Every structure is written in C-alpha cells, then in structure tokens.
C-alpha cells in the first residue's frame, strides 16, 4: 500500500555496507543523551561537534566533499598515545555507531586485544588477489587491510568500492586506535542482518540487484522514532549498576513479509 502521513516506507537493505550513510542521529543522539557528550555548533556552519564528558574525545561531523565527513579524535592517556579514526560520508551509521558504542561502554574490554580480522574470517571473507594483503568481502566490494604509508603509518583501511574509480566510502583507524574499537567496526561490517533506510533509493550508492537486495514495508512512522528512543534507553542503562527494567520499545518490524525489489 502507498505510504501515508502516518506510515513510512522502510527499505531493509543487504549488504549493509552498500546501504548508504543513514541518519546521523543514530550516532549523535545516543552520545549526547545516553553518554553525556556535550555538543557545540555554529548555526552558520553545517557541522556538529560532540565532546566526551572528560573532554578527551571529540567527534566531528562536517560535510567535506574532498575528504572524510566523520572524524573521531582522542587525546593521549597513560600508556596510549593520542589516536583518531575517520569515516566517509556514505559509511553506514550502524558501523560508526558500533565504534562509539564500544568507546562509551563503561565496562572495560574483556580478555586480550581482539583481532579485527577475525569477525571477517568467520563470515567467509577471503584473501584478495596474489600479492595483496588483508581480507575482501564475498561480494568483492569491501577491502580491509592494515598497512603503513609515509603519511599513515600502520593504519587500518576499510574501503568500499563498486569497481575501479568508483569509491563508495573509506574508514581509517590509526595505529594507536584501541583494537577493540576496530574490532567493533569489523564485527558490525561482517553482520549479515539488513539495516533499514527511510530515504529509499536516494540513499543507495547502487541499485544493482546483483549487489544489493531491498525489501520494504510500510510501517507506522512512530515505530521509526521509537527505534532511536529504544537505542538511547538501552545505551543509557549501561551506565547504571542496577538498571531499572525498561518498558519494551516499539521497534520497526522485521521484514519477513516484505517485498523484494
């Protein structure tokens, strides 16, 4: 049925790395409301700045047609130099949110430093052509590598492309980025569950049915808003030693009965 003022057409998209950027609020609103990050902005500038309560971390969202739109910087701490990560405009917000969720988790990382390649190996990512390093996605559109250059020593590069000279997005993590944050990104990247978008085809870098699967539903608009509210409550509960029981949130329904496109 056609969308109405009370309903929203939601596309469920796989693979998630070709779903487009999504709504920045999925990242910025929980950082502010659930983790206490303060925001500052100049109403005359199209950018968002969020800083952590201890003022050690800064997230910048700034449209830059020549570079990365998202930049996460962290000051030096005892035993760890300053570090940064950056993400292109079409990096899905779910992947970036995995990093900020791990960064703001009050529980310390468990065990040894994780291997960011491991989640990819477990989901059939493979070595690229002979002579190259790293891992490539099964559809051949994402390449994860760890290498050094004179400008970016020992940097993690995650690059999504649709072919030669057709970049979609790139994520960078410098050598001092905590490994569990890089692993959080690759875990989200390897996740085969679809992500949803309300902008339809306008947000997608490609409509090639051999690369992207779309399933859609018309759902009540309130459910879309409730998904973000539920995310905020869930993340806020992490900061309480004994969080109170939360009322069930109305999530956008799963697409079992949707229609393929």
Image (tube, rainbow, N blue to C red):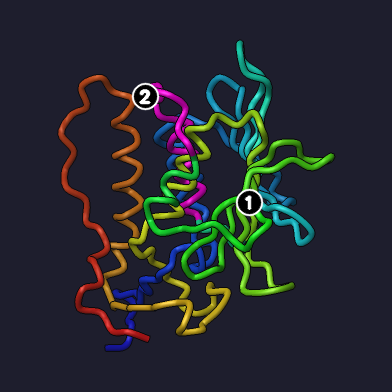
Instruction: Mark 1 and mark 2 in contact? Answer it, CB < 8 Å.
Output: no
Q: Which residue is mark 1?
A: 133
Instruction: Give above or below for 151 relative to 82.
Output: below
Q: Residue at x 69, y 49 (%)?
A: 43
In the rendered image, which quarter is residue 219 located in? bottom left
Report if residue 179 is visible in the image: yes
Count of numbered marks: 2
Tell me the element at label 1: loop
Front position in the image: 35 or 117? 117
Q: Residue at x 48, y 68 (%)?
A: 19
- Magenta region, residue range: 93-115
Which quarter of the rendering shows the N terminus? Answer: bottom left
Instruction: Give above or below for 50 relative to 216.
Output: above
Label ID, residue 47: none
Which quarter of the rendering shows the C terminus? Answer: bottom left
The verdict on residue 227 being magenta is no
Residue 259 vs residue 36: left or right?
left
Front position in the image: 235 or 214? 214
In the image, farthest residue toward the top? 78
The verdict on residue 99 being magenta is yes
Report if residue 48 is visible in the image: no
Q: Which residue is mark 2?
A: 110
In the rendered image, which quarter is residue 153 located in? top right
Closest to the camera, between mark 1 and mark 2, is 1
Q: Earlier in the sequence, mark 1 or mark 2?
A: 2
Tell me the element at label 2: loop
Q: Position of residue 109 (x, y in %)?
A: 40, 25
Instruction: Give above or below for 50 relative to 141.
Output: above
Q: Position of residue 217 (x, y in %)?
A: 29, 77
């Amino acid at each position: 049925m056609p969308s109405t003022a009370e309903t929203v057409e939601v596309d469920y998209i796989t693979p998630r790395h070709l779903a487009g950027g999504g709504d920045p609020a999925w990242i910025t609103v929980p950082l502010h409301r659930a983790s206490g990050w303060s925001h500052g902005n100049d109403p005359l500038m199209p950018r968002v700045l969020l800083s952590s309560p201890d003022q050690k971390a800064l997230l910048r969202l700034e449209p830059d047609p020549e570079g990365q739109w998202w930049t996460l910087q962290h000051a030096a701490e005892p035993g760890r130099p300053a570090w940064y990560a950056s993400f292109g405009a079409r990096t899905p917000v779910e992947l970036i949110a995995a990093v900020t969720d791990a960064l703001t988790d009050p529980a310390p990382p468990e065990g040894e430093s994780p291997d960011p390649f491991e989640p990819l190996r477990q989901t059939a990512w493979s070595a690229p052509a002979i002579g190259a390093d790293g891992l490539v996605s099964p559809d051949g559109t994402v390449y994860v590598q760890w290498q050094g250059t004179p400008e970016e020593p020992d940097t993690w590069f995650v690059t999504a492309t649709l072919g030669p000279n057709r970049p979609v997005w790139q994520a960078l993590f410098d050598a001092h980025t905590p490994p569990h944050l890089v692993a959080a990104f690759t875990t989200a990247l390897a996740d085969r569950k679809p992500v949803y978008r309300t902008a339809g085809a306008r947000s997608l870098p490609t409509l090639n049915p051999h690369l992207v699967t779309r399933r859609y539903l018309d759902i009540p608009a309130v459910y879309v808003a409730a998904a973000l509210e539920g995310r905020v409550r869930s993340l806020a509960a992490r900061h309480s030693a004994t969080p109170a029981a939360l009322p069930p949130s109305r999530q956008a329904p799963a697409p079992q009965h949707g229609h393929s496109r």
